[in-house]
């Protein structure tokens, strides 16, 4: 391949040829040979493709008990076991599972938790057994290590990211905020010149499925009694959180016109939608009784500018039967796509606001069916 005719072409000509390909094909070409890899990872080519649209993928978070399921199967049955040294992603446009190696990270069993602007954020164990939040681009194998945190933050905190230099770890009582200058990373790069800023969050209850939309953090909180849930939507701007020294950081978003919107859903969750919109997803109660059963899963959409709700989607009854008997199901996604997984269900349901509902088969994992994840907009030009 090194002496083939295509390698005799001028570098600028090769750049223009590869530039005509979509990102998915460029990623494949990088694996063809060493010469192609050098061309397609050169700074000059990365700069040229910076304007290409990202490849929108659905990434899986590894199971907490993945290390218990690597035994041999005596029946020689092929099982999809999730390897913690890979980031497993699903390409909804191609209906195909892919995986990106994470062996370039100097951490044992890195745990991906979030993504934004083409970068993936992971928890990693340092040699001193402290937790560090790592930001990386799995496509270019570059990474940056943020200042170390205590292990309690990784166990109880939700990682929220909205750009390459804004990160928040949120709990019920406190929030950590990091905003550092971005720079190209090498295996020795670290964030020692920057520090996390700590603020009091003072939420009325443990935040459920918090999301970061532009400059605003939104979270659901159960402010009801031990025997009956009462969900409310709370919001707080980053500027208020950083500047306020009292307990009035969070505002409860509610309107008389909303009626019983929070009462019709069982265990609702938030997912970031398109633009300045959010999705609230939960089981649709068949009545307002205390132990009411659910008839399906409902997706509601809130326009944060107009503060108006609308129905965005409703899981078909025949699909919901696979979730009906499960005691727990998980929701993840963003934009115009949302994934659903349940215990003892070896497939995921996918909602696409344009194409409707469908099943995703061949899910990597340990077989319990309960998957968590996030949207990964893959970009070759993103720098940690």
Image (cartoon, helix red, strand yellow):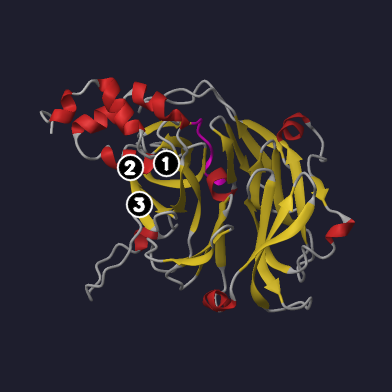
338 relative position to 383: left or right = right
N-terminal label among 3 and 1: 3
- Of badges 1 and 2, nearer the viewer stands 2
Any mark on residue 125, and which?
Answer: 1
Region in magenta: 146-152
Label 3: state its secondary structure: strand
In depth, the one of 9 and 211 nearer the eye is 9
Image point (75%, 46%), residue name: 304
Task: Kindly tell me whether residue 383 is visible in this rendering.
Answer: no
The residue that label 2 is drawn on is 25
Any mark on residue 98, and which?
Answer: 3
Q: Quadrant of residue 310?
A: bottom right
N-terminal label among 1 and 2: 2
N-terminal label among 2 and 3: 2
- Of badges 3 and 1, nearer the viewer stands 3
Q: Position of residue 226 (x, y in %)?
A: 76, 67
58 relative position to 284: left or right = left
Q: CA distance from mark 3 to mark 1?
A: 25 Å
Task: Kindly tell me whether residue 36 is visible in this rendering.
Answer: yes
């Amino acid at each position: 391949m090194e002496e083939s005719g295509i390698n005799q072409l001028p570098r600028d000509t090769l750049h223009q040829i590869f530039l005509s390909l979509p990102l998915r094909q460029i990623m494949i070409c990088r694996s063809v040979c060493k010469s192609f890899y050098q061309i397609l990872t050169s700074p000059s080519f990365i700069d040229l493709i910076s304007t290409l649209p990202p490849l929108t993928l659905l990434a899986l978070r590894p199971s907490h008990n993945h290390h218990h399921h690597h035994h041999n199967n005596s029946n020689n049955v092929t099982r999809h076991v999730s390897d913690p040294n890979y980031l497993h992603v699903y390409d909804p446009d191609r209906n195909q599972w892919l995986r990106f190696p994470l062996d370039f990270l100097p951490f044992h069993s890195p745990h991906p938790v979030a993504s934004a602007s083409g970068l993936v954020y992971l928890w990693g164990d340092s040699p001193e057994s402290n937790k560090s939040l790592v930001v990386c681009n799995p496509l270019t194998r570059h990474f940056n290590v943020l200042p170390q945190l205590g292990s309690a933050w990784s166990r109880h905190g939700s990682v929220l990211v909205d750009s390459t230099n804004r990160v928040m770890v949120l709990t019920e009582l406190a929030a950590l905020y990091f905003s550092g200058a971005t720079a190209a990373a090498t295996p020795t790069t670290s964030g020692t010149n920057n520090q996390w800023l700590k603020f009091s969050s003072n939420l009325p209850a443990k935040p459920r499925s918090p999301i970061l939309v532009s400059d605003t953090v939104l979270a659901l909180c159960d402010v009801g009694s031990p025997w009956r849930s009462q969900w409310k939507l709370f919001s707080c701007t980053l500027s208020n959180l950083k500047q306020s020294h009292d307990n009035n950081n969070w505002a409860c978003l509610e309107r008389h016109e909303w009626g019983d919107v929070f009462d019709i859903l069982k265990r609702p969750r938030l997912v970031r939608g398109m633009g300045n919109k959010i999705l609230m997803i939960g089981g649709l109660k068949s009545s307002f009784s205390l132990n009411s059963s659910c008839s399906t899963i409902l997706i509601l959409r809130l326009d944060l500018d107009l503060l108006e709700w609308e129905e965005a989607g409703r899981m078909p009854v025949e699909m919901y039967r696979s979730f009906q008997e499960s005691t727990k199901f998980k929701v993840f996604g963003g934009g115009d796509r949302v994934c659903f997984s349940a215990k003892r269900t070896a497939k995921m349901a996918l909602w696409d606001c344009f194409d409707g509902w469908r099943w995703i088969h061949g899910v990597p994992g340990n077989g319990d069916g309960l998957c968590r994840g996030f949207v990964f907009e893959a970009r070759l030009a993103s720098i940690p």
